[in-house]
Image (cartoon, rainbow, N blue to C red):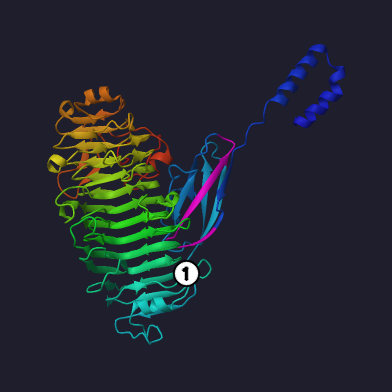
Amino acid sequence: MKSRDFVYFVKLGFAQMTFVTRVTVLALLAAGLSAPLAAQVSVTISPSLVTMATMATQSFTATVTGSSNTAVTWQVNGVTGGNSTNGLLSTTVLGTANEALYLGPSAVPSPASVSVTAISQADPTKSATATVTIHLPSRSGVTYYVAPSGIDTNTGTLSAPWRTIQHAANTVHAGDTVQVEGGTYNEIVTMKTSGNATQGYITFTNYPGQTPIVDGTGLSVGGQTGLFSMVGTFNYIIIQGFEIRNFSSSTRGKVPVGIDFEGAGSNIEILNNHVHNIVQTLGSCSAANALAIALYGNQAPASINNVTLSGNEIDHNTTGCSENVSFDGNVQYFVMANNLVHDGDNIGLDNIGFEGVSPNVSYDQARDGWVFQNTIYNISSTTNPVYHNSVGADAYYCDGCTRIIVERNLIHDSDLSEMASEHSGHTSSYVMFRNNVIYRSLYVGLSIGGYASKVGGTDHCVIVNNTMWNDGTFGSSGLGEIQIQYYATNNTIENNIAYATTTGYLLYDFTSSSPQPAALDYNLYYSTVGAASSHWDWQGKAITGFSAYKTASAQDAHSQFAAPQYVNITTAPYNLDVLSTSPAVNAGTNLGSSTVGVLDYAGNPRVNGSGQINIGAYEQ
């Protein structure tokens, strides 16, 4: 009976009821009128209709009402997390109100429209869906050609190509494509024109099956200069399929860069390039800077946004006090995926904040990013002329960044990886570091917190389901697997495997600047020196033995000390998956897909069909 009919019934029949019946009906009626109607869960998604290019990046936000549980599960065409055919979708970015990043597929799917869906975790029958139509980036249909045999006075056709990429950059319009044939181009290419949402991207790409080389040998560096350069506002640009090399300086204040974007703009794709031998030879940190790829968001509130960096190889650069790849300042909504970064003498991938790149400190922070499936190795400052054989180069570094998911990366034979801030009063925050494999780091496997008492720290970062082995082995400087430094607050470290070898160091929390820098539990620790001789620091106090550490710290109540049974740590290539008999199997705590992720390091479902989860980066 509907409530309106119930009231009508009471009015008609009330006079004919007994006294007891009247009292009962009045009580029921009063209860019905005073009790609030049960809230109905509903979900909305924004934007709900998107047209975007292949390999472009798009953020989505879901809003859940009617429940205190506002979490959602993200799907593409019914697949949680999506796939390579229809596009990939992150879980909700930590520290946001249900924001996820979508990376379009590399080819237009069939059909060309896909569905991005947010499903309420409180009521899975409630969801909201956005329609995403994928198209090719450049849509004017005009393709120009550049070749070593060309002449810039030609028409730019395949039979009459131009000679320089710069002439193409001076000529093209939104929607055009420039195909560059194999050969060497000794030039600096300065972008002049943007694409737009209507006509599409301006695409600079290799001629199919060939590799054009942009070579900086003998070219002068003026200030910060890129072999591919964008300074100002640029939108809808693709740089794809080039070898970019041999750009160097030995002059103070001259900064050679492979690909350089300083300014603001959106929809930038840097794909499948090989950037190497970008060099600054000076030996002073105040003078020696070079970068392979740099995005400096130096405007505000306008940002550099919706950026894809994918499939690039970046190696053998001498970057001084700078980084191989730097997203710095007002840079938002970006993906760094499937890049190979190796053999560098300073930081590999870096997301930076609070360096004064943006004129407004409220925007001076790389944020809302997704860093996944990159391979980073041989990143060490021991060969850097600035650092004089000391260790300190991060393979991955969140230096004051916020709201980043870092997952399923392979990091090895580098100095360390880190989430911290080098600037007092500022932190790296809301970073999700999960399902990564780290081994043979010279200084420490993973570090949080500021390196000194006068710098910043790490706040609300989550470190879960990572696998670490044989880290912190650099003489007396090596500190084992996990380090906690100054001003670490509200952090979580769970479900990780930490396997120390000769040093025996498993956790090094050397400062009491924060009384509870992190909550640790459900980790699996092991060292070849044994549980009783294992080394720990908690709140600046050195501790020997696993039991003594647990007592002193009141941490790791459910954690174990046992050999994880890695598949192969004897000969390279190493395999840090675990055997079926490992104590890591089904021993983790299931923190939910929003925290532990959808896939493990190897691309398998992160949680098994019974809701159980392994400790470490691999699921069975």
Q: Which residues are magenta?
A: 50-67
Q: Nearer the viewer, residue 441 or 5?
A: 441
Query: In the picture, residue 168 is in which quadrant?
Result: bottom left
Q: Is residue 409 visible?
A: no
**Three-letter residue code for mark 1:** Gly
Q: Is residue 62 magenta?
A: yes
Q: Nearer the viewer, residue 342 or 11?
A: 342
Residue at the (24%, 64%) spot, across then down = 276
Q: Nearer the viewer, residue 475 or 202?
A: 475
**Taking 188 as reference, is 79 above or below it?**
above
Q: Is residue 397 magenta?
A: no
| Residue 12 percent location from the top left of the image | 86, 24
**Residue at numbered disc 1:** 195
Q: Regarding mark 1 in the picture, which secondary structure is present there?
A: loop
Question: Where is the C terminus found, in terms of image quarters?
Answer: top left
| Residue 361 percent location from the top left of the image | 42, 50
Residue at the (75%, 22%) spot, across then down = 29
Q: Is residue 113 visible?
A: yes
**Taking 613 as reference, is 338 above or below it?**
below
Q: Residues within 10 Å of mark 1 (few under 14, many from 20)?
A: many
**Predominant SS along the magenta part:** strand
| Residue 260 percent location from the top left of the image | 34, 64
